[in-house]
Amino acid sequence: MTLGAEDRMAITELIGLHGHLLDEGELDRLGEMFTADVVYDASDLGHGEMRGRDAVRDTARSMTGHGPVAHHVTNIVLTEDGDGRVRARSKGIGIKADGTCGSVTYDDLVVRGERGWRISRRTVGGRRTPPAPDSRV
């Protein structure tokens, strides 16, 4: 399968939808983004692994008042898996109500279903320290 421009745009918009849905509290629309059986691994952030959209929604609701007020996604890189699936890697920036912010990396497995592209697995990794200098330089 060769990933065409239309599919690339659809997947990029899918990943960008995350911040809009969360920031507007539209958690009942997570079906537009995730498969019903999504595995959302936020263990690195202390939220564990959620299985299914309902678990993702319930966790997001439990964070009301504690999580970011703004989610921004950038640096999206898509790689074809060869089996009709796509790997997407992106960066996320979360802004909290007190003005502090944090950075994460999203590693997504994206699949095409009857309703278009959806994320079937997401792993979120936090960034807490700068990388070590490259010793090869």
Image (cartoon, rainbow, N blue to C red):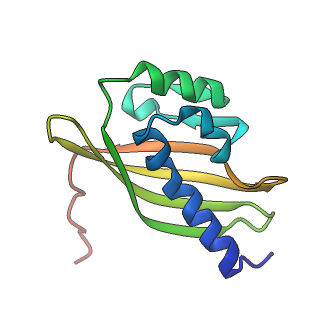
**For this view, does 76 lie left or right of residue 91?**
right
Q: Position of residue 56 (x, y in %)?
A: 56, 29
Q: Position of residue 14 (x, y in %)?
A: 59, 57
**Image quadrant where residue 86 sits:** bottom right
Q: Residue at x 40, y 41 (%)?
A: 23
**For this view, does 29 lie left or right of residue 60?**
right
Q: Is residue 136 above or below residue 62?
A: below
Q: Residue at x 56, y 65 (%)?
A: 12
Quarter of the picture holding the C terminus: bottom left
Quarter of the picture holding the N terminus: bottom right
Q: Residue at x 30, y 23 (%)?
A: 65
Q: Is residue 109 above or below residue 12?
A: above
Which residue in the rendered view is the most extreme toward the right?
A: 114
Q: Is residue 134 above or below residue 63?
A: below
Q: Position of residue 26 (x, y in %)?
A: 52, 36
**For this view, does 117 lie left or right of residue 8?**
right
Of 47 and 54, which appears nearest the observer?
A: 54
Q: How many marks?
A: 0
Q: Residue at x 25, y 68 (%)?
A: 134
**Image quadrant where residue 116 sits:** bottom right
**For this view, does 112 lie left or right of residue 38?**
right
Q: Position of residue 81 (x, y in %)?
A: 71, 65
